Amino acid sequence: MHMIKKISAFLLLLTFVVASAAYAQSETVKYTVAGVDFYAKLRKTDIGRTRNVSGYEQTTTVTSNLFVNFYSDAAGTIPYSVSNFTLKLERKDAWTLRRLDQIEGQGAETEEVTFVCNGSEILLVGSYISSVNRDTRYAYPPEDPSGEYYIPSYESNLITYKLLPQASTPTPPDDASCTCNCLKPLFDYLIASKRLLTPKEDDVKVSHLIQSATSAGYKIPSSGCNLLLDNINKPFYATTTDSVAQIYRARIGDCTVSIRPTGAGSVNFYQLTGGVCETALTVPYLNGGTLVAKLQVDSCFTCSPATSTECYSVVTDTIVNPYTFGLMGNWRVSKSYAYYVPRTSSRGTANTDIRTAGTYESFASFWMPRADKTMQRQPDESRWVWNQAITLFNRRGLELENVDPLGRYNAGLMGYDESLQVAAVQNARYREAAFEGFEDYGAGYTACGQATNCGSTRSLDFTSNASMLDTLEQHTGLYSLKVPAGSSVGVTAAIKPAADLPVSLAFNNGLRGCLIGGILTPVVEARRTLIDIRANASAVLPGFSPLAGKKVLISAWIKEEQDCKCTSYTGGRVSVIMQQGGTNTTLTSAAAGPIIEGWQRVEIIADVPADATSFAIYLGATGSSNVYFDDLRVHPYNANMRSYVYHPVTLRMMAELDENNYATMYEYDDDGTLIRLKKETERGVKTIKETRTGLQKIGQTN
């Protein structure tokens, strides 16, 4: 750790060659940097190798965990802690596929993984799976050298790993002013409010804690303390579970703080009172006027993986079991029909017969019986008229898109792990609309979106910019996207034609032998059977992809991090770039209303060219201050969208945004009861309704 403070950066190359059959541990490699020696050792654990041969296809799967350990001694007995290293792993897996004794094919796979981490042990790759499929053909008798067949063997000859550690200058530790001015009032509040033992499961952010402490009268200047500022959007939680203990520890984002007794024995931390700050990096705590404990910062570190992934769809990129992923076997509503014929009624002065009046004058059944006593769908379309067809469902069986007989589409966008509706759109298709409120990035999405679809299920996916999510400023909900001054972030979508390919499943039949005891039985005609089933790209949900030749409306809310005594922001903007062959068309947002409590709505109206191929949206901070973005949405110009924001933990609705992207806010008390309803207008935020309720205790009299 000390040697890092003496240098700004260093670059080393470490190469290990490991035979895949033995997976032997590598030798220790020595580094000498700024006069300090340390040693690195690469090791593999939990190795497994399986091979599955089925008919014409074989699959070889290799699983492993890859670690790097750092030591102070060459024997590897004393762990050594390194900090702020950037490690780059390059994995090369050379393979050969043999036909008889000749090499039939060969190749290599390369993967790069980047980590910024610290500690004496770093897990570079956990449960890495390398699966390779190769077609295998057989012919008999095997002794016939003229017969065409492959020996089912997959050989991984050599695995090479390279580590490229690079040290960076760490942030100097905060001085005593940070500990006293920031951490002392924060922990004074935690002790007074009995929140010192906040568990990790509560998911309490540092920013929320600072807001609560400030509201309670504790002055915490977060901007003057690097420890709080660097961890403002990260969680706070205690690792100590008892208020009476020999030591108290808690995590503030990437930092560990502790309250340590000055003598032997346990301390009741809720009976402590903060004393006068010392010149050292500690805060004294008293009990009855006697010094009994001190607050200090133990350590700070960062461990944030940035893993390169190659997304692989288990539906469209390989054989698929359609029943496993819901492509077949689930009965859902397809169309709704209504029966239209004249009804009987009394005319003139005749009395109404309520027993017979209003019945159909004639009736034709929707289902007709067959000779084998089954029913066949044979509707008379002049009488049975369909009024709605459902065209898309998600993997949870929830409706996403429908269409009426006039060709008008309605769609619903889902969020929070596809369990809650975040937007409802009229006169638009599912793939034409998008909404991003930056609220549900902790709702269980995987790196590849979902197991069945290569790509995120989000309409606009800012996962790669999740570190920019901010909890200090928000238009609705708890989060917004904070773009640093002079930078921009964006997402790109493909522009596709209006026609959709129908979902199709290809059932491939062929001859198949049986592998018994490692010996393949001869193939006979009687064994013609199903080889595999494959699905086309329409089997998975379409991502956001505007239609060529249509007009699109883009709307968002922005807030600049400055004291703007102005009528409109100039440093934050939303841009749209549409690519047409070798040329680009760029449009920039314009203010679409006044600044309302610090936030301003901006809009872009874009005509998508008929020959456009891509549609990119960029959120940029072009001025000298940071810019916050929230409630970004895209839909056709002649469509209406209503969007919804929920609390990421309780899932209560926090806001509903109308057709003009103006919000209605919902506020709740600690019991979850709605107490206040606010409406955002061009003249400001107005309180529409406010209620108060109470429960009378048993035995209490008025």
Image: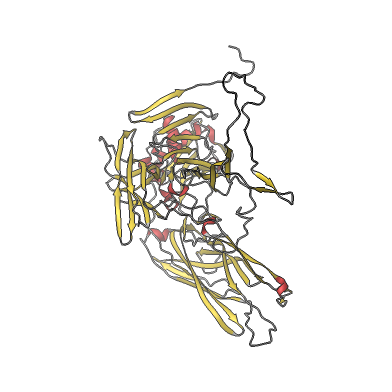
Instruction: Estimate the x, y position of residue 437 in percent, counting from the top left.
Output: 43, 42
In the picture, measured across the screen, residue 619 lies left or right of residue 206, that is: left
Q: Nearer the viewer, residue 191 or 462?
A: 462
Instruction: Estimate the x, y position of residue 211 in percent, counting from the top left.
Output: 43, 35
- Give the total of numbered labels: 0
Residue for point 47% across, 38% down:
645
Residue for point 46% across, 23% down:
690
In the picture, measured across the screen, residue 577 lies left or right of residue 79, that is: left
* Quarter holding residue 558: top left
Q: Nearer the viewer, residue 81 or 623?
A: 623
Q: Is residue 594 above or below residue 21?
A: above
Q: Nearer the viewer, residue 366 or 538?
A: 366
Instruction: Estimate the x, y position of residue 601 in percent, counting from the top left.
Output: 34, 38
Q: Is residue 410 above or below residue 609?
A: above
The residue sitting at the top extreme is: 702
In which quadrant of the rendered image does the N terminus lie?
Answer: bottom left
Residue 418 makes an appearance in the image: no
* Quarter holding residue 570: top left
The residue sitting at the left extreme is: 566
Instruction: Estimate the x, y position of residue 22 in percent, counting from the top left.
Output: 61, 74
In which quadrant of the rendered image does the C terminus lie?
Answer: top right
Residue 600 makes an appearance in the image: yes
Residue for point 39% across, 49% down:
173
* Render colour scheme: secondary structure
